[in-house]
Amino acid sequence: AETYCLQVYEKLALDPNVKPTLAKEGVEPLVGHYIQKIYVPEKNKDKDKDKDIAEVRSDVHNGVVQKVWTLEQYPLMKDYLAGANPFIDLVGEAVRKPAYRSPSVRKNENDPMLGIDRQNCHINREIARSVQARANYRIGIGDIDGAIYDTITIHRLGRHVSKLGTLVGSLVGLAIEGSAAGVGGNPEHQPTKGQLEHFLKEIQSLPDRCTFAECLETERFFGLGSIQDTFRSDFYVNTGDGIWEFDVLAKWLWLRWSLDRNAVLRQFNDFFAQAKQTAAVFDEKSFVKSRVSSNPFRYLSVRSRSENISNILLNLFVPATDAARKAFDRSDCCDNMKCLTLALLLYEKEHSGKMPEGDWQTWQAAIKPYLGKEADKYFHCPSAGSPEETAYVLVRYDNAVPVTPETILPAEAEKMNVPNTNGLIPNEQGLFTSKHPGVYYTALHSGAVQGQSKQKPKGQQTK
């Protein structure tokens, strides 16, 4: 443990002889860990007697991370808020700097680097949940400025985590951003026009997230390192006593003498080089399948056997690559819808609580001034092949329907189904859809964006 700490200090350019200035004062700063410690059977015996303690912990965790809450609902969270505030404030300060990441340090010399970064991803996701819990509390008590600060912290944390580079890191970064809720979830404390303008400006000023091509480049680096590890003899030695076990020795000998390491590395490198070069249009599945042979003679020589086995393994990797590409598009779509929603809320503030009238072209033109000079880019879903395929439509409600934080404002739809006249279409016609596999997105009056399964919503009309 001491050696590990020294490595961390070295990577952060810190003097190991100087004690940390931010001391842990008895309260666990990660909300999930705190709930595990504080909600114990002894404190739960007087209520929720029919619930298992694990259910209670799950309910509390979901209640503070996913919903607006106050201390009246969860009084045991009072100490958490007081103790975790310095930690969450420090995270907010750190993610607003140009670079942010946990140092990647091997506890043992033979530990694979890929596993280390996955551990960092898990820690950052827990940090994001903790920040979101405080944001939800701030919304509950009407501290909208504080909630905006925390929500932007989550977005910036997600952008930094996505720059870990690997597919796992990028997907976790996108998930962190997706967990950031809107700030209008409390009907009694709605954001003012000035707060909405500030929130929209902060969203539009977020640093660029890691691109898919950049992600592939770092994924290649980790992949090549993992392949090298599997061919190293010391990678298979028991690190406790340095003694070889027979089955481990057999595996290493099989790899060492039945496969050509350079051939495996070349195939892996070639795949990622082409995928990165044409990241927007590269067909990974066709590329790999064209190189996988069922000819048994391909396994006779070491080189051909190595190339074919490499392509088979890459074929297993293709679905994850394709899923990551689509996740990047979905995240960009959510960014668009969040900005559109904030612009609509600003329009509502300036027009006595009314939304724009007219067809889809009219309401989009009405909110463009709030979106700035590059307003047009927010009206096109990146998953659609052309601007003519998918439109963001605005849901219209009868005057008798009360507006709540859960009221849907914009949603995705096929542009060909949106009329150019009055814009009214019943949802029974299956208007809502998208180019995202199995899901379309809707944005709520609270400012949150949610994914919905491709089923027909009821009781609403769109324009």
Image (tube, rainbow, N blue to C red):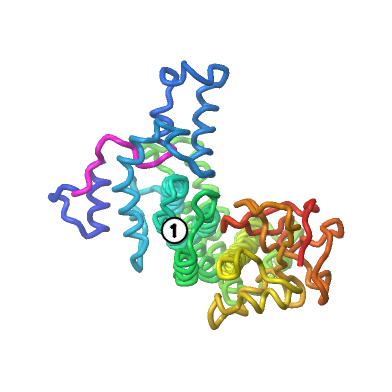
Task: Name which residue type carries label 1.
Answer: Ile
Between residues 384 and 47, which one lies in front from this camera angle? 47
Image coordinates of residue 137 in percent, x first then y, are 44, 45
Q: Is residue 342 left or right of residue 2?
A: right
Between residues 149 and 218, which one lies in front from this camera angle? 149
Q: Is residue 172 visible?
A: no
Q: In the picture, residue 153 is in which quadrant?
A: bottom left
Image coordinates of residue 282 in percent, x first then y, are 66, 72
Quadrant where the C terminus is found in the figure: bottom right
> Circle 1 is placed at which residue position?
148
Q: Is residue 45 above or below residue 292?
A: above
The rendered magenta stretch, by its main secondary structure, is classed as loop
Q: Is residue 421 visible?
A: yes
Q: Is residue 25 magenta?
A: yes
Q: In the picture, residue 82 is in which quadrant?
A: top left
The residue at 27%/58% (across/down) is 11
Q: Is residue 421 above or below residue 446?
A: below
Q: Is residue 57 above or below residue 18?
A: above
Looking at the rendering, the stretch of residues picked out in magenta corresponds to 21-32
Between residues 82 and 22, which one lies in front from this camera angle? 82
Image coordinates of residue 66 in percent, x first then y, are 53, 44
Residue projecting furthest to the bottom: 373
Instruction: Tell how many labels.
Output: 1
